[in-house]
Image: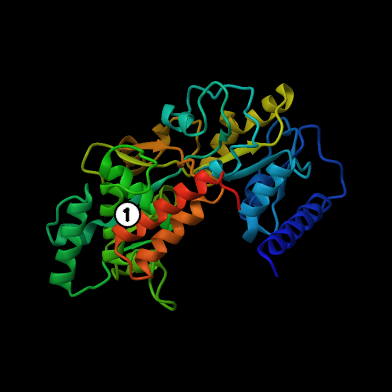
């Protein structure tokens, strides 16, 4: 079977899935349209009961295991199955070429760096619904026990990890449940102090060597999950998302949240909150969708455990406010439709394929350049 034939089969399968999803509800969608959301968030949106009903309905995007493919197909094909899609902000580059900017400005309560991450305050490409990013959570009691320095840089965190390994006989001290490419960009940008989209640079090599050294996110099958390892003391530090970190710290006072290690001022990380992209703009619909940034809905999200995008963080825990103050958000790099895959494959070359960090990033950067010169065709 040729590559073109396989591609056609995949597209046909995904189009069929979209057709099934669009026909899944027999009732006519309200005037505002239908918004695709992850199945895991269906109960969250269904549980919201505003004084004035929202003029659109939410429907799960299925099969969600192929969400990225479905989102790209939905936007690129002009499908009318959904008028909007709720997606992690780090996937904005996948649909940026087809998404319609919103004809409503973001409220002043949305942080300037978050606004820039979604295309600007005046005509955002997406509406930021929640706020999230990568952070570091440590067992503060173990840190104090050994008199370790704060993990404010990669070098400091590495020294702390080496101290744990020597004094407590623990081999796996640091873990991560972040997507590998997200952790890579966060560490590299924070180390460098800027959101440089180049894949090959000294900061990128330095970050990848750190990931290699501690085998981050690569524990053997059957091991305890990263969060349980942290609670049990099997590990002493965990890279995770801010919303998961906040829940962990609320449940266990021994834990403390830190921004991503930087060493050059604030951490610079991917903005990864949930955001809403739309296939076609219209003033009336844009105003309706902007109700997701209304204080009542944002307060509701906060009660559900999310960090809202349009509510000042005054009501958030001190650890969350401290992490936010030490963090600068940035949109994901625009690397083309297959850029994420090339980056991920490059990271696998280093973490599982035995390549050096420098060799893996050089190879991946060359592939990105070659794909760009070909118009990113597949």
Q: Which residue is mark 1?
A: 137
- Element type at mark 1: strand
Vertical position of residue 232 compared to residue 14: above or below? below
Q: Pick whichever, 116 or 302, lies toward us.
A: 116
Residue at (38% x, 72% y) in the render? 219
Task: State how the image is colored.
Answer: rainbow
Residue 34 located left or right of residue 308: right
Q: Residue 229 appears at what percent x and percent y?
A: 35, 69
Q: Residue 266 appears at what percent x and percent y?
A: 28, 37
Which residue is the extreme one toward the bottom?
A: 222
Residue 49 located left or right of residue 156: right
For residue 254, say whether it is visible: no
Vertical position of residue 50 compared to residue 200: above or below? above
Quadrant where the image shows the N terminus: bottom right
Q: Pick whichever, 165 or 320, lies toward us.
A: 165
Q: Pick whichever, 321 or 6, lies toward us.
A: 6
Q: Residue 54 appears at what percent x and percent y?
A: 72, 34
| Number of residues whose C-alpha sits closer than 10 Å to that of mark 1, classed few (under 14), some (14–19) or many (20 or more) | many
For residue 295, say whether it is visible: yes
């Amino acid at each position: 079977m040729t590559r073109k034939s396989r591609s056609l089969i995949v597209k046909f399968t995904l189009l069929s899935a979209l057709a099934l999803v669009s026909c899944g509800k027999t009732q006519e969608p309200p005037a505002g349209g239908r918004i695709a959301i992850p199945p895991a968030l269906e109960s969250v949106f269904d549980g919201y009961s505003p004084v004035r009903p929202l003029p659109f309905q939410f429907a799960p995007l299925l099969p969600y295991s192929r969400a990225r493919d479905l989102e790209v197909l939905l936007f690129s094909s002009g499908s009318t199955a959904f008028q909007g899609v709720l997606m992690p902000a780090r996937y904005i580059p996948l649909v940026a070429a087809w998404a319609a900017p919103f004809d409503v400005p973001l409220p002043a309560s949305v942080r300037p760096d978050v606004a820039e991450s979604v295309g600007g305050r005046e005509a955002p490409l997406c509406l930021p619904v929640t706020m999230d990013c990568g952070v570091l959570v440590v067992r503060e009691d173990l840190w104090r026990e050994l008199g370790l320095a704060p993990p404010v840089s990669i070098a400091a965190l590495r020294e702390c990890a080496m101290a744990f390994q020597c004094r407590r006989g623990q081999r796996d001290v640091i873990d991560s449940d972040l997507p590998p490419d997200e952790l890579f960009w966060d560490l590299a940008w924070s180390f460098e102090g800027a959101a440089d989209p180049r894949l090959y640079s000294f900061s990128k090599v330095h970050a990848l060597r750190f990931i290699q050294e501690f085998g981050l996110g690569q524990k053997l099958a059957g091991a305890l999950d990263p969060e349980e390892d942290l609670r049990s003391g099997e590990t002493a530090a965990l890279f995770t998302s801010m919303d998961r970190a906040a829940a962990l710290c609320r449940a266990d006072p021994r834990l403390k949240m830190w921004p991503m290690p930087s060493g050059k001022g604030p951490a610079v990380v991917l903005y990864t909150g949930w955001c809403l992209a739309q296939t076609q703009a219209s003033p009336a619909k844009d105003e309706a969708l902007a109700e997701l940034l209304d204080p009542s809905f944002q307060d509701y999200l906060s009660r559900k455990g999310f960090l809202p995008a349009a509510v000042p963080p005054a009501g958030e825990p001190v650890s969350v406010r401290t992490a936010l103050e030490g963090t600068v958000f940035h949109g994901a790099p625009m690397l083309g439709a297959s850029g994420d895959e090339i980056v991920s494959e490059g990271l696998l070359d280093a973490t599982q394929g035995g390549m050096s960090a420098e060799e893996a990033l050089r190879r991946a950067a060359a592939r990105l350049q070659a794909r760009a010169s070909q118009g990113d065709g597949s």
